[in-house]
Amino acid sequence: MRKLPNVFNREQILQLLNIIDEPWLMVAVLLGTFCGLRRREVTNLRVQDIDLSTKRLRVENSKNPNRTYEGYGKDRVVPLPDCLITTLQRWIQLLGNDAYYIFPSLRDPLKPITGEHLWRAYKKALIRANLNTIVKHDAIGLPRHKYNFHTLRHTYATLLWEKTGDILTVKSALGHAKIETTMIYTHVTNRVIEQKVHEAFSPKISIPKIIDGKMDPLGILMRRLAMGEIDASTFKQLRETLRREQTDNVYIG
């Protein structure tokens, strides 16, 4: 029997979201949690892959980026829960009309951030949320952690299974080729109710506001850093000022 995956409970999800103060990381974590995207799928996501009008996003052949014949059929369309629509809309507006990737590299906007960049930021968030649990050490003494970015995908699958009781819906949403791969989530929980994918994540779920109608100060800082208007040192200083003051009265425009 395959080892059961670790998942976050609802309290841990909110615990993690509440300590993230970087807009891009918040959006990345939300995509992992409420769309079940893998880390590479998140970093490679393009603006054109998101259709807010139909509430869907397209994941392009993440398992076989070389697009060989064997790899065809790996593309999938994932429903966007209502609780993500406004956040994604404001994030895309923040990126600007010329944005290609949802998470562009600061060095080269025509390239996405790397998976390692996302993992390092996410790991720091786990530490701050007290979720950086070590379960064991490997043969050479390196720690093995209970939670990683893929835990968000496991959590998505588990929540979806709990809400739908439909293993084919979960299989399709995750993009699994074999039903046997998906069946592991039926062992994680046996709570089964008759719902569909859009009902799995209620709009009532509380997500911290990272971009409101009036652009938040941290969002302005991130944009100025991305545009090269301020350097990393200045960004860090202003961000620390924001954290100390905890007010919107800090001038960063």
Image: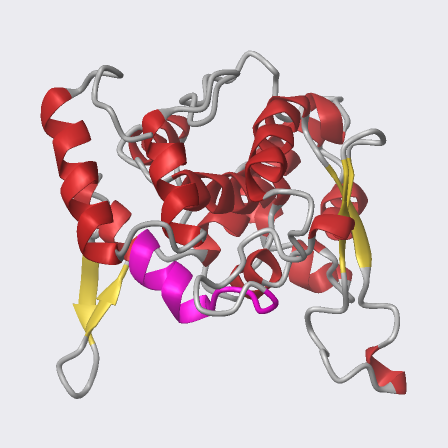
Residue at left offset 69%, top offset 44%: 97
Residues 13 and 27: in front is 27
- Left or right of 76 in this view: 38: left
Residue 129 found in image quarter: top left
* Residue 111 inside the magenta-drawn segment: yes
Residues 232 and 62: in front is 232
Residue at left offset 21%, top offset 22%: 250
Residues 60 and 229: in front is 229
- Left or right of 43 in this view: 118: left
Residue at left offset 42%, top offset 56%: 149
Determine the residue located farthest toward the left in the rendered image.
244
- Quadrant occupied by the C terminus: top left
Q: Can residue 188 be seen? A: no
Q: Can residue 53 be seen? A: yes
Residue at left offset 49%, top offset 47%: 28
Q: How many marks?
A: 0
Q: Is residue 3 above or below residue 208?
A: below
Q: Which residues are magenta?
A: 110-122
Q: Residue 58 placed where, x, y %?
A: 78, 52
Q: Residue 151 placed where, x, y %?
A: 44, 52
Q: Is residue 53 above or below residue 6?
A: above
- Left or right of 106 in this view: 169: right
Determine the residue located farthest toward the top in the rendered image.
204
* Residue 230 inside the magenta-drawn segment: no
Main SS class of the magenta portion in the image: helix
Q: Is residue 173 above or below residue 54?
A: below
Residue 224 found in image quarter: top left
Q: Is residue 170 above or below residue 59?
A: above
Q: Residue 6 placed where, x, y %?
A: 40, 51
